Image (cartoon, rainbow, N blue to C red):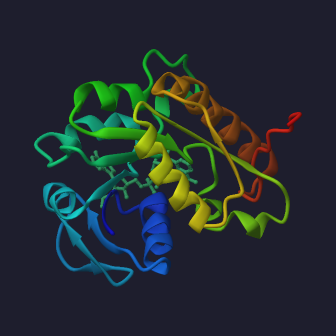
Amino acid sequence: MKFGIMGTGEVGSTIARGLQRLGHDVVLGSRSPGGEKHGLPVRSHKDAAAFGEIIVNAVHGEDALQLFQGCALTGKILIDIGNYQSAISEPLARTLGETLQQAFPEARVVKTLNYISAHLMIDPASLGGPLTVFVAGNDAEARDTVKSLLTAWGWQDIVDLGDLSAARSMENLASLWVRFNAQANHTNFSLALTRKP
Ligand SMILES: NC(=O)c1ccc[n+]([C@@H]2O[C@H](COP(=O)([O-])OP(=O)(O)OC[C@H]3O[C@@H](n4cnc5c(N)ncnc54)[C@H](OP(=O)(O)O)[C@@H]3O)[C@@H](O)[C@H]2O)c1
């Protein structure tokens, strides 16, 4: 499939690599279009969105809304991996996932991976222990497509939390990630949901 990834930072580059590995076609969307990064074309956000059948948000929440203005999103899945930086230290007034969905009702927003260390997103087995990834979105078919992608990256415990109101729980986990990262001083950790079947 064709993917347009917004953001060329740690998450954007990692997801691009993971998609390449699976044989997908990827264009990166950037404020500085032109040339290549990791062997992938870097284009404007609008061009990357036009290219993608599936779009990935890999920028901070504070930057996301403006970036998607005028982008071709109709009917497309928008995988939102972002967090508001402000949510690390302040109560989350509105979630990024729901804000994006409300601003762009023509897209099908699916929230996932936003509290997972970037390198584990596409290689969860490398941690060597159980770990859980949550998925939320208003469109069940879109959630299923994203779950298939996660499975292809090796995720085994994929928990479907239902509609996008679950973005609140997921985005609040980002502050836990930042706190633990500061204590541990590495990114080789994640969460596992232990429960009765
Ligand atoms: N790093 C992680 O392990 C991790 C894990 C889970 C979730 N996340 C979330 O994923 C998102 C991206 O994180 P990251 O670590 O990849 O950040 P990052 O390395 O700082 O990259 C963010 C990218 O956003 C773009 N950008 C910066 N300012 C922008 C602006 N004003 N308008 C539009 N685009 C702008 C830049 O790409 P261009 O210069 O090419 O435009 C930049 O490379 C964040 O919301 C973060 O919370 C990160």
Position of residue 27 in the picture relative to residue 195 (left or right): left
Residue at image x 67%, y 59%? 155
Q: Which x, y percent locates residue 60? A: 40, 42
Considering every residue shown, the one lying at the far left of the view is 70
Q: Residue at x 86, y 34 (%)?
A: 195
| Place of residue 39 in the rendered image (x, y in percent of width and height, measured from the top left) | 34, 84
Which residue extends farthest bottom? 39
Q: Measured from the top left, where is residue 73 in percent x and y?
A: 20, 46
Note whether residue 147 is visible.
Answer: yes
The residue nearer to you, when weighing 89 against 3, is: 3
Residue 63 falls in image quadrant: top left
Quadrant (top left/top right/bottom left/bottom right) for the N terminus: bottom left
Foreground: 77 or 187?
77
Task: List x then y, in percent, for residue 126.
Answer: 75, 69
**Residue displayed at 21% across by 80% down:** 35
Nearer to the camera, 2 or 97: 2
Query: Relative to 42, is 182 above or below?
Result: above
What residue is rendered at 54% in x and 30% in y? 162
Tell me: residue 179, above or below residue 95.
Answer: below
In the figure, residue 41 lies in which quadrant? bottom left
Report the side of 83 relative to 3 (left or right): right
